[in-house]
Amino acid sequence: MGALKKALKAFENVLPQFLVVLILVAMALAVLDTSTISFILGKDTGAWGVLVASLIGSVTLIPGFVAFPAAAALLQGGAGTVQIAAFVSTLMMVGVVTIPLEIQFFGKRAALLRNFLAYGFSLIAAVFVGWVMNQ
């Protein structure tokens, strides 16, 4: 019974964030049609699309349980696999928004190094996903 209460409490804490992000994604998908998503993040955008997706992911603060459904919606809307891999991996690993807090706890050098390495690894992971998906 204690575990159920904890789970319900966790659900109550997450629900407002989840709903806000879902509403924002739904609004974005309503405004951006398939051709616009394909133009910005489509498979044919190549390195520029990966760069744009990685920069958006780096500055966005979305929990993982919302990021993956959003990524699926973007894929269905015409985004490329490599671009979405870059978006999701930077979203999970790079924290431009949280860098002041990281600097406060870990120091400037460590925070910047961690984010720089995470960004680089995210791009490597995106290229790897593209390679696997094209096999």
Image (spheres, rainbow, N blue to C red):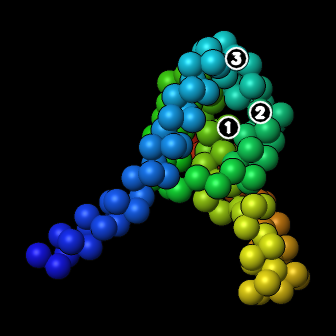
Write the residue at 45% across / 51% down.
Answer: 16
Q: Secondary structure at mark 3?
A: helix
The residue identified by callout 3 is 36
Q: Closer to us: mark 3 or mark 1?
A: 3
Write the residue at 75% across / 52% down.
Answer: 59
Horizontal placement of 126 versus 4: left or right? right
Q: Amino acid at mark 3?
A: Thr
| Image quadrant occupied by the C terminus | top right
Q: Earlier in the sequence, mark 3 or mark 1?
A: 3
Image quadrant of residue 85?
top right
Image quadrant of residue 99?
bottom right
Gap in angstroms between the C-alphas marked 3 and 1:
14 Å
Asked if residue 67 is positioned above or below residue 120 in the image, the reply reads: above
Q: Amino acid at mark 2?
A: Gly
Asked if residue 26 is positioned above or below residue 36 in the image, the reply reads: below
Residue 131, visible in the rendered structure: no
Residue 113, visible in the rendered structure: yes
- Whether pointer 2 and pointer 1 mark residues with C-beta atoms closer than 8 Å, the reply is yes
The residue identified by callout 2 is 49
Q: Earlier in the sequence, mark 2 or mark 1?
A: 2
Using a 10 Å C-alpha cutoff, classify the residue at mark 2 as few (fewer than 14 neighbours), some (14 to 19) or many (20 or more).
Answer: many
- Whether pointer 2 and pointer 3 mark residues with C-beta atoms closer than 8 Å, the reply is no
Q: Earlier in the sequence, mark 2 or mark 3?
A: 3
Horizontal placement of 99 versus 74: left or right? right
